Amino acid sequence: MCEFDDFPQPGRKRIVVPAAVGQLGTDLPDFETDALKQLSSGAVLMMGDNSALPKMPAAPTLHDFFRHRLLLLGATGRHLLISAQKALEAGLDEDVVLAVLLHDISLPCLVRTDHGYWGAQMIAPYVSEKVAWAVQYHQALRYFADEPNGYPYPENYNRFFGPDYMPPEYIRRDAEFARAHRWYMASRQVTIFDTYLFDKGPLPDLEMFDDIIGRHFKTPKEGLGFDGSPVAHMWRTMIWPNNFL
Ligand SMILES: [Fe+2]
Ligand SMILES: [Fe+2]
């Protein structure tokens, strides 16, 4: 008996075709064409749990997504915990701490481009309108300094994008809209506590946010991805990121 027999498509080579959105415009190989060629030798295209990833429970919570997905790859999961820890220690309102904890949730396992908008959309059914709003607009506000409130233009953005980078019109428009909004400071606080990915130090304990998550994040009883909400597919995509379809 094979150790992977309790995974779908047992006994066959399962091929992963990485998501197209990260490949367009790169010199990565054409995974789809290569994969289809291998079908004649009995391989199949992956569907369902990938044995290379921790199995998610049937009704996953936000904690499960942090533990089994967001913290697996790269630095962003860690960045979320460190940023939120600093916001908590600074005594920010609980809802703003939650916005800091979730502000880049789209980055590690879903999609990078327009991450503030994706992130806001995927959490919107489960948090207050203000929390989702703060997450959405942090993306645009990051490009615009607000020195009186303690937010200089990020030096790292000069290195990331070049010192002459100018964000596109929709970002400038959304930043201007956010600036005049009554929830501006919630989103601005997200940018202020948006520490950099290279933060050193021990990984904060996710449990330190249990109370805040319990009070401000409405976990569906069916689990994230299975509640039939308009964003359930976004969470399922993180559970099964390698599904061919
Ligand atoms: Fe961000
Ligand atoms: Fe961030």
Image (tube, rainbow, N blue to C red):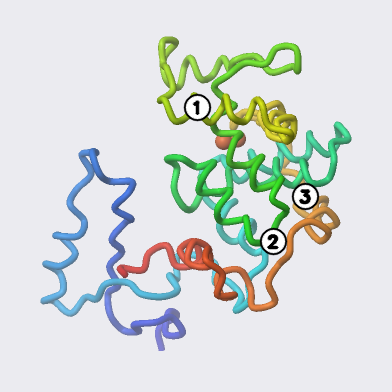
Q: Amino acid at mark 2?
A: His
In percent of the image, x 62 and y 16: which residue is there? 145
Pointer 2 residue Cβ closer than 8 Å to ligand 2: no
Number of marks? 3
**What numbered label is drawn on residue 173?**
1
| Residue for point 64% across, 61% down | 125
In depth, the one of 219 and 59 nearer the eye is: 219
Residue 200 visible in the current orientation: no
Q: Closer to the observer: label 1 or label 2?
A: 1
Q: Which mark is residue 205?
A: 3
Quarter of the picture containing the C terminus is bottom left
Q: Position of residue 79 (x, y in %)?
A: 63, 38
Please, what is the three-letter code of the amino acid marked with disc 3?
A: Asp
Instruction: Give the left or right position of residue 173, taking residue 100 as reference.
Output: left
- Cα separation, mark 3 vs mark 1, equals 37 Å
Q: Quadrant of the N terminus?
A: bottom left
Structural distance between the alpha carbons of marks 3 and 2 = 11 Å
* Sequence-first tag of 3 and 1: 1
Residue at screen point 78% across, 39% down: 85
